[in-house]
Amino acid sequence: MLIRNIELEKQACMLVNWYELFEKDTIKSCIIPVPDDVLAYLRQDILILPQECSNFTDVSTGEGFQTTHYDAFDERFGSDGADAEAEEEDDEQQPTFPAFSQTLKDAIGSLGGNAFLKTDWHCPKDAQWITLGQSLCVRDITDIYQLLKASSFSKEDFRERSTVNDSGYHIVLKKWRDIHPGSEFRCFVRNGSLVAISPRHWPSYHEHIARERTEIVSDIVSLFKEKIKDTFPLKDYVFDVYRPGKDKVIIMDFSLYGKGHSDSLAFDYDQLDDEALVATIEEEDEPEFRYLPNDCGIQPIKRNVYGFPQDFRNFFQGATTSEGAGGDSNNLVNRLIEQCNLQQLHDNEES
């Protein structure tokens, strides 16, 4: 049995290492190296935002949308009788990264004012509860810092690495697109052959998938054979695509093949391995495509697991009862209370 070099595989799947190879077939992205001082800050558990995030108001986006942010170190976070000396001490403790923050601002602007955030391997989907609307769409540096500081997935990417995979740390901003969940697919490559395709948002039902099944498979196979197969360096891997329409498939990401690395969705990795051993070259044009052929009602979606943390909900619900939810909506505490109450209402409607 061939021993895998996981670190080398992870390196190949970093967007910084494959973006130029597939730039014409993927979404426009800005790859931003993380300096050592910012890296040390992002590894810390405490949720203190940099000085550049203070006093943000009325941030315009490329779509004309405006959003207002809280003052990260407003006196409302301290006691009512806090004196000037205490405020000065807070300012001294608050980090600042002016050059890096400006780079983030410029990147968002170059992408039209809205961007999708990820690190070298993961997006901070476990922290999207902290943003208004629970979205991974970032419109300014406050959104970026909040998501990165609150995400365990991001912290995992920022951990120290072996010398084999010591190629630096990066923040990736992709041009934001409103993607229909029924247009995303996960593709499994084993021994250099495309063996299986699954809807990315499994097990959701989408009527058009059954109707367009043949075209979906044909378009993905064409992309794989013409652009990916002889270019991507690994033999076993997973790649995600977005198919906005006929004859148009966009590469979204690459990830490691196998249990514990990438969700197999509609498949089982043991079964994929067994089938790959007996697959023929001709079968590559017809990878197995699994999807829900009928509407089976409401199905559990894994992304719902990453909702507002229960301990936060308990704390802020208690705060709402004892102090009320009034006050300035720009206050971070009030924003979290509001978000908590919205999710509680949503949970009650589903139960």
Image (cartoon, grey):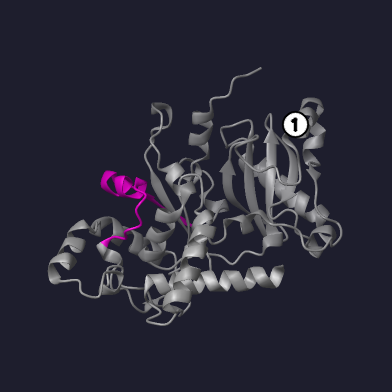
Image spot of residue 22 (x, y percent): 54, 47
104 left or right of 195? left
Q: Is residue 278 magenta?
A: no
Q: Is residue 46 magenta?
A: yes
Quadrant that contains the C terminus = bottom right
Residue bearing the label numbered 1:
270
Image spot of residue 310 (x, y percent): 54, 59
Q: Tell me which amino acid carries mark 1.
A: Asp
- Residue at x 63% of width, y 48% of height: 240
**Mark 1 surroundings: few (<14), some (14-19) or many (≥20) residues within 10 A:** few
| Residue at the outermost right position | 294
Quick check: 263 above or below 63? above
Query: For residue 213, what is the image quadrant?
Result: bottom right
**SS at mark 1?**
helix
How many numbered callouts?
A: 1
- Residue at x 73% of width, y 60% of height: 246
Image spot of residue 265 (x, y percent): 71, 46
59 left or right of 4? left
Magenta segment boundaries in residue numbering: 28-50
| Residue nearest the viewer, comparing 338 with 320 | 320
| Residue nearest the viewer, comparing 339 with 227 | 339
- Residue at x 51% of width, y 61% of height: 128
Residue 19 visible, this orientation: yes
